[in-house]
Amino acid sequence: MKNHIEEKRKERSMTQQQLAQTLGVSRQTIISLESGKYNPSILLAHAIAKLFDATIEEVFVFEEEEK
């Protein structure tokens, strides 16, 4: 799943560490999220969207699976 976390974080002049502390997760979690290697729980996705004053869909890009 792709996302706009890095872009939104930088718009707010936040470091990965600051974002991690605000969300109560590790910096490694933020790195993994930004690189698309980790899909967050719905609770974490909601917290991220809320922090950025956005909807989950504005932060995360859900890609359809091919059948």
Image (cartoon, rainbow, N blue to C red):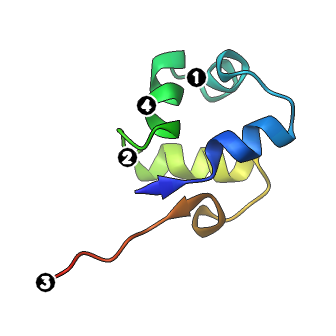
First reached walking from the N terminus: tag 1 or tag 4: 1
Name the mark nearer the viewer: 1 or 4: 4
Q: CA distance from mark 1 to mark 2?
A: 16 Å
Residue that numbered label 4 is attached to: 32
Residue 45 sits above or below residue 54 on the image: above
Q: Amino acid at mark 2?
A: Asn
Q: Amino acid at mark 1?
A: Gly
Residue count near mark 2 (Cα–Cα under 10 Å), binned few <14, some 14–19, many ≥20:
some
Q: Are marks 2 and 4 in contact (CB under 8 Å)?
A: no
Residue that numbered label 1 is attached to: 24
- Residue appearing at x 38%, y 71% in the figure: 63
Q: Position of residue 22 (x, y in %)?
A: 70, 25
Q: Position of residue 7 (x, y in %)?
A: 72, 45
Q: Are marks 1 and 3 in contact (CB under 8 Å)?
A: no
Residue that numbered label 3 is attached to: 67
Name the mark nearer the viewer: 1 or 3: 3
Residue 26 sits above or below residue 2 on the image: above
First reached walking from the N terminus: tag 1 or tag 2: 1
Q: CA distance from mark 1 to mark 4?
A: 15 Å
Describe residue 5's horizontal placement relative to residue 62 as left or right.
right
First reached walking from the N terminus: tag 2 or tag 3: 2
Q: Secondary structure at mark 3?
A: loop
Residue 46 sits above or below residue 17 on the image: below
Q: Amino acid at mark 4?
A: Ser
Q: Secondary structure at mark 2?
A: loop
Name the mark nearer the viewer: 1 or 2: 2
Q: CA distance from mark 2 to mark 3?
A: 21 Å
Name the mark nearer the viewer: 2 or 4: 4
Residue that numbered label 2 is attached to: 39
Q: Using the rendered view, name the quadrant where residue 9 is placed.
A: top right
